[in-house]
Image (cartoon, helix red, strand yellow):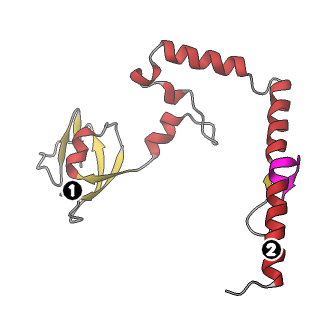
C-alpha cells in the first residue's frame, strides 16, 4: 500500500486525537468510531460526582469491608451488591442468562435453580455431537437417562 498525502493526514489526525484523549478535558470525535470522553474529562466528572455525594468512596469502602468480613464471596451474596444498568442486581441478571457448557458431564457441577437454562455443546466433550438446551426443573418426574434427562441435586435437567 503506497503512502499517500491522505494517509499522512489521517495519521496526523489520529495522533492529535490521541493527544487530546490524554491531555485535554474534551469530548473526542475520532475520524472513525463513536465520540468518547477524554481521561481528564472522566476524572473531572468523577471528582464532581464525589463532591456532590453522588458517589461516596467511604460508603463503597464500608460495603467492601462488610462483604469481606462476612465472607461474601464464600457465602455467595456479593452478587446482590452489584447493580446492572437496568437496576436489577447481578444475581437476578444471572438467573436470566443462558449458560453454555462443553458437555453433558458439566451439568453435574452446574448450580441449578428453577428455570435455569443452559446450552450444552456436545454429549461428549470436544466431539461436538448431540447436546442441546436443558432447563432445570425441581418438579420433573421424568426418569434420568443421562442424555435427555440428567439428574441434578433437587431435580432434573430436561
Would you identify the image quadrant in which residue 151 lies?
Answer: top left
SS under mark 1: loop
Magenta stretch encompasses residue 38: no
Q: Is residue 36 left or right of residue 155?
A: right
**In the rendering, at what x and y percent does residue 130 appear?**
21, 64
Q: Is residue 39 visible?
A: yes
Q: Is residue 87 above or below residue 6?
A: above
Would you identify the image quadrant in which residue 136 lies?
Answer: top left
In the displayed orientation, state which residue is furthest to the bottom. 2
The residue sitting at 80% across, 63% down in the picture is: 15
Please give the label number shown on residue 125: 1
| Marks 1/2: CA–CA distance | 48 Å
Magenta span of residues? 20-28
Residue situated in front as seen by the camera: 96 or 28:
28
Q: Is residue 101 above or below residue 65?
A: below
Q: Is residue 132 left or right of residue 60?
A: left
Q: Is residue 46 left or right of residue 73?
A: right
Q: Which residue is mark 2?
A: 10
**In the rendering, at what x and y percent does residue 14 appear?**
79, 65
Which badge, 1 or 2, is on the more N-terminal residue?
2
Q: Is residue 52 visible?
A: no
The residue sitting at 50% across, 26% down in the picture is: 78
Amino acid at each position: 500500500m503506497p503512502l499517500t498525502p491522505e494517509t499522512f493526514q489521517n495519521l496526523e489526525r489520529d495522533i492529535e486525537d490521541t493527544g487530546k484523549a490524554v491531555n485535554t478535558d474534551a469530548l473526542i470525535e475520532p475520524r472513525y468510531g463513536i465520540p468518547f470522553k477524554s481521561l481528564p474529562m472522566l476524572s473531572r466528572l468523577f471528582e464532581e460526582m464525589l463532591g456532590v455525594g453522588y458517589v461516596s468512596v467511604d460508603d463503597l469502602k464500608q460495603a467492601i469491608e462488610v462483604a469481606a468480613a462476612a465472607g461474601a464471596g464464600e457465602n455467595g451474596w456479593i452478587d446482590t451488591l452489584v447493580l446492572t444498568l437496568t437496576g436489577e442486581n447481578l444475581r437476578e441478571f444471572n438467573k436470566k442468562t443462558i449458560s453454555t457448557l462443553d458437555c453433558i458431564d458439566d451439568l453435574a457441577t452446574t448450580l441449578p435453580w428453577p428455570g435455569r437454562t443452559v446450552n450444552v455443546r456436545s454429549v461428549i466433550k470436544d466431539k461436538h455431537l448431540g447436546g442441546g438446551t436443558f432447563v432445570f426443573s425441581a418438579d420433573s418426574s421424568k426418569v434420568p437417562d443421562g442424555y435427555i434427562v440428567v439428574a441434578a441435586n433437587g431435580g432434573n435437567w430436561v
